[in-house]
Image: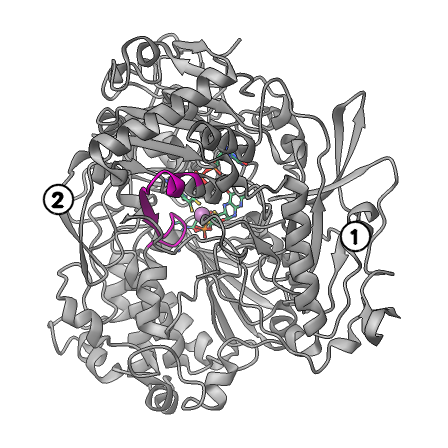
Amino acid sequence: MSHSKKSGPVRVSRRTFLSGTALSALGAAGLPLLTKGALAQTPADEILSGCHWGVFRARTEDGRAVEFTPWEEDPWPSPQLPGVLDSIYSPSRIKYPMVRRAWLENGPGADVAGRGTGDFVRVTWNEALELVARELVRVREETGPTSIYGGSYGWKSPGRFHNCQTLLRRLLKLNGGFTSSSGDYSTGAAQVILPYVVGSIEVYEQCTTWPNVAENTELMVFWGANPVNNSQISWQVADHGFAKMEAFRDAGGEVICIDPVRTETCDYFDGEWLAPRPQTDVAMMLGIAHTLYTEGLHDQEFLDRYTAGFDRFLPYLTGESDGVPKTAEWASAICGVPTETIEDLARRFASKRTMLALGYSTQRQHHGEQIHWMLITLASMLGQIGLPGGGYGLSYHYSSGGAPTHNSPTLPAITDTPGQPPAGGAAWLSAEGNATIPVSRFVETLLNPGKVIDFNGTKITLPEIKLAYWVGGNPFSHHQNRNEMVRAWQKLDTFIVHDFQWTATARHADIVLPATTSYERNDIEQVGDYALSHIVPMKKIIDPVFEARSDFDIFTGIAEQLGLGYEYTEGRTEMDWIRGFYEAAKLESRAKGMEMPIFDVFWDSNKPLAFPVTDEEQNFVRHASFRDDPLLNALGTASGKIEIYSTNIEKFGYDDCPPHPTWMEPIERLGGPTTTYPLHIASNHPIARLHSQLCGTELRESYAIAGREPCWMNPQDAAARGLVDGDLVRAFNDRGQILAGVMITDVIRPGVIRINEGGWYDPADPREAGSLCRYGDVNTLTVGISTSKLAQGNCGQTAMVEVEKFVGTPPEVDVFSALDG
Ligand SMILES: Nc1nc2c(c(=O)[nH]1)N[C@H]1C(S)=C(S)[C@@H](COP(=O)(O)OP(=O)(O)OC[C@H]3O[C@@H](n4cnc5c(=O)[nH]c(N)nc54)[C@H](O)[C@@H]3O)O[C@H]1N2
Ligand SMILES: Nc1nc2c(c(=O)[nH]1)N[C@H]1C(S)=C(S)[C@@H](COP(=O)(O)OP(=O)(O)OC[C@H]3O[C@@H](n4cnc5c(=O)[nH]c(N)nc54)[C@H](O)[C@@H]3O)O[C@H]1N2
Ligand SMILES: [Mo]
């Protein structure tokens, strides 16, 4: 699947491309040439590049990058950009190849409990490459290729060539294979269940566009969705197309935000804030659905024509099947939102053109499969799916979903199979290895080799892993239940990491190889995951810092040690690959009736190349074609309709994923029947970081409290604990303990605290189980269980804790120092 996080679907429409503003002259063969006007201006002394945070220009002085300025056409630049520059030179930068002393002296598997203690030895690049090559061969020969884990997950930098994860798999394939991963941490539950419901993974599909919303939506509901914060970045180079929301705001559109936090999005629209207890949204939606049904506000015609199985869901909704009518009153007791408010929501949703925008956090929870299913059921009852400005949207908060898709060619990318033609998009969800595990189950795999687990109707035997190779990800940030993970990691003989920052993951490695940032190499990428508005040259800004090498050069060096150097590179250089991708896009573009300039002109222009957008795409409405003709444009589900009851899921017989959307108690929650700890942690995506990225930079000074990760707390909860603003606190539960700095605020619901994901894990004593994390890695406290047998997704948003004032001498934070001098 080439969606890969995620080029939105490129829906080609030739009819109106000529009206695009970027077209200005005629090129060869009489085709409109995209150069003039399509290439925005960049001053001659500045170098253009792009990153997750957007397109930018860099100024250098004496070979050093000194300033990154957002591209002048960026409608809403990210304030994180200065941190991106700082990540090149920050004290956390990795400078040299390093090997853990015990591993170097006593071999693979030596003193595994000593990982993370920081005792590294500097080696030369030749020594390092030889050590890695020898170890890859040893493990493959002794225990087979599946004992090498190459499922390396994470937010590597964009770029069609320097895709370090594809490059890793390319090497591991040449070495005979590896164990891979499927799915991701973002939408682990939703992306597995939604194909049964609407016939596609849906969470990464284009939404009804913002211009269409601005014109047609009367009531916009952001349900656990915070685009004003989360659209700062994209998986590709950010377009910040969420700026188009401004039109909706200016039109005075009505907004409701349903979220334990009054978000930046709520403030931006001056919206109405409703704060249910976290993890109870399915119950709240059921209460709304029950009201719709009993008051006859549901659209029976829509349900009959476009959905299957409402009749089998109905007895559950009315309580006929289990004796519990899912009334607003019932829902209120669970979610904490007043009965009248729930009833009122049903009436308002039904009486207006309503768009329900759902985020991802609500499915990153125990039984997270249920919420997207229930939201689509609710939207089906409202009957507005496929109408302008109505229905639901699942990516409005992600990579600027809703920004109209431009008419651009596919830009190919390096593949993990040498000799294969370049593919469009990266292989993210495809199961490419000799064995594949659901991505969130790596710790479970380490702890239980040979165990058979359920997954989406299949059985998977967990392989025995001896070597893990991680590039472009930070598992010691992104995975849950850190202490369980640290214990599991001890099963590994060898852990190899490339990064440019001394993250907790690099600190726990046996072999650490210094990678270049994107700003020290050349690449090419598209702008916007959904917009696909430009192709941008990602130009090298400076020479590699210290001894850093690109991931490609590192893997080439290892392949050479294996005698496979030519097979790895196919005899092509960085610029050969980039030029090849561009040429392929140019050919496709010609077939679409547009002429891109020749590569050298594009590259030397130092400017992004713009593509036009059609009126049709400006006004795209999700599922409009299905609504127009549900037979011709049937969904990819068993029935071709929206499935409110799934006979396929019924066949699996899972006790934790019933065949219709169902309220299921999570293992722990605020107000839960068996829950002992009093505070829920919202481990949201950070405002001033991309996950853990940039935590090692100067940006930290702008948000750290008492030198630690902030912990937002309602005044009521703070008073009950005798806490004041700025206090150093210990947050703890049976799984672990962390330090944090308190920020008292009424933008968070009582009973809920917010500690963002991505704070660097800094155990006071890495050898001690359950050691105090001194900086504030929230995943020290979260649960490591999976969402259900169906999706096996992660549950990062499931965690209950207690918080108390820290007494005694505060330990110093150590995680931001370099371990190589
Ligand atoms: N509790 C909780 N946990 C969560 C979440 C949550 O909401 N709550 N969210 C989850 C989600 S949605 C996600 S996506 C994950 C994110 O988890 P990750 O994607 O693992 O987090 P990042 O901090 O982006 O880590 C990327 C790492 O790659 C490195 N890197 C970047 N470019 C390159 C490159 O070109 N080469 C090499 N070698 N390295 C590079 C960066 O320096 C950084 O260390 O976290 C998940 N974990
Ligand atoms: N600035 C920034 N932007 C990012 C990222 C980043 O790290 N930094 N990461 C990117 C990535 S990889 C992803 S996957 C997306 C993540 O997208 P999401 O997972 O949607 O983002 P979150 O910030 O975790 O959560 C969104 C909102 O859901 C609310 N919420 C949490 N739990 C519940 C609940 O139980 N019920 C309700 N109703 N609301 C709840 C939170 O308070 C928050 O306001 O963001 C992307 N954008
Ligand atoms: Mo994500």
* Quadrant occupied by the N terminus: bottom left
Residue 15 screen position, x and y as percent: 70, 83
Taking the image as shown, residue 254 lies to the left or right of residue 153, namely: right
What's drawn in magenta, residue-wise?
Answer: 171-188
Closer to us: 105 or 142:
142
Residue 363 screen position, x and y as percent: 34, 55
* Label 2 near ligand 1 (CB < 8 Å): no
Say the numbered circle drawn on residue 451: 2
Q: Amino acid at mark 1?
A: Phe
Residue 194 belongs to the span the image colors magenta = no
Q: Earlier in the sequence, mark 2 or mark 1?
A: 2
Label 1 secondary element? helix
Q: Residues within 10 Å of mark 2 (few under 14, many from 20)?
A: some
Can residue 562 be seen by looking at this rendering? yes
Can residue 722 be seen by looking at this rendering? no
Q: Is residue 731 above or below residue 317?
A: above
**Residue picked out by circle 1:** 602
Residue at 48% across / 48% down in the picture?
418
- Where residue 458 sits, quadrant-wise, is bottom left
Q: Is residue 211 above or below residue 148?
A: below
Q: Amino acid at mark 2?
A: Lys
Label 2 secondary element? loop
Residue at 16% across / 75% down in the picture?
319
Residue 426 screen position, x and y as percent: 49, 53
Q: Residues within 10 Å of mark 1 (few under 14, many from 20)?
A: some
Say the numbered circle drawn on residue 18: none
Residue at 67% across / 30% down in the picture?
85
Taking the image as shown, residue 65 lies to the left or right of residue 115, namely: right
